[in-house]
Image (cartoon, rainbow, N blue to C red):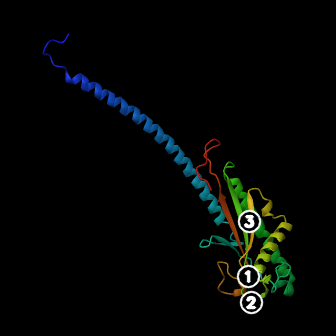
Amino acid sequence: MRKKGEKDSFWPSYVDIVTTLFAIMVVLFAVSYSRFRVKEAELRKIADKYEEIKKIYQTVENIDSTYFAYDSTYVKHIFKIQVTYQKGEFDLYKLMADRTNRAEADTLRKRIIAAGQEIKRTVENLQNMHDKKQDIKYLVVIEGQASADGYYVNPYFNNDVLSYQRALELHRFWKKNDIDFSAMPKCELVISGSGEGGVPRDTTREEFNQRFLIHIVPVIGNIRMDDTQKSVVSR
């Protein structure tokens, strides 16, 4: 028994408090470190997916320069094969060269087929390069342009309509030569015509605007870290 007048010792109680606080700090540190490692792993996976997406865009930009010139300002591929039509025509067998030099026109059509095959190869490579679990699709846009030559018969026959008809006919021409983007898995085809108002425009010679612009746009859907996790990035 404590003797009368004997004071309680301060130090044992202080040691108990410090020991308890230290134990709490150790537990908190362990929990925090564990959560940090989990978050670090998640961020590393997101960084890996970002690098994967960046490679996809780089592949799109680096399509064969033999047939396409990439315009980074408008994020479009300009068809380098100069296609000059007879006025008001959209059939690829009614080029200006068909009137003057049929052999030259046939050579142009062969180059157009080769360009379509290059686009197809690019899309196939893109589809093969990323993780099959990722929801990544590709939008291929064939945009027709027209020269400002005053072609206007009525609202149904003008350069706006003509540019669309030319793009549609290009798709049909490629399809006849086993190049069908609409039939490729995870690929969507859009046909469009911008008439005299599309960008970019050739400012050197107006007839050079009788051309096609090609867009290959990766459409990023759900990016998954694995088969079980919820989406990290959603469209």
Q: Amino acid at mark 2?
A: Gly
Of callouts 3 and 1, which one flags the residue occurring earlier in the amino acid sequence?
A: 3
Check disc 3 and give the amino acid type. Answer: Ile
Residue 44 x %, y %: 53, 47
In this rendering, position of residue 188 left or right of residue 230: right
- Cα–Cα gap, marks 1 and 2: 10 Å
**Residue projecting furthest to the bottom:** 150
Cα distance between the residues tagged 2 and 3: 32 Å
Look at the image and tell me in which quarter the N terminus lies.
Answer: top left
Q: Residues within 10 Å of mark 1 (few under 14, many from 20)?
A: many
Q: Quadrant of residue 167?
A: bottom right
SS at mark 3 in the image:
helix
Task: Kindly give the residue lying farthest to the front in the view shown.
Answer: 4
Say which mark, if any, is on residue 146.
1
Q: Residue at x 29, y 27 (%)?
A: 17
Q: Is residue 34 left or right of residue 128?
A: left
Residue at coordinates 69% horizontally, 68% vertically from top-left?
Answer: 215
* Residue matched to label 3: 119
Q: Using the rendered view, name the quadrant where residue 12 is placed.
A: top left
> What mark, if any, has residue 150 been given in the picture?
2
Q: Position of residue 102 (x, y in %)?
A: 87, 82
Q: CA distance from mark 3 to mark 1?
A: 22 Å
Mark 1 and mark 2 in contact? Answer it, CB < 8 Å.
no
Q: Earlier in the sequence, mark 2 or mark 3?
A: 3
On screen, residue 17 versus residue 111, left or right, reads left
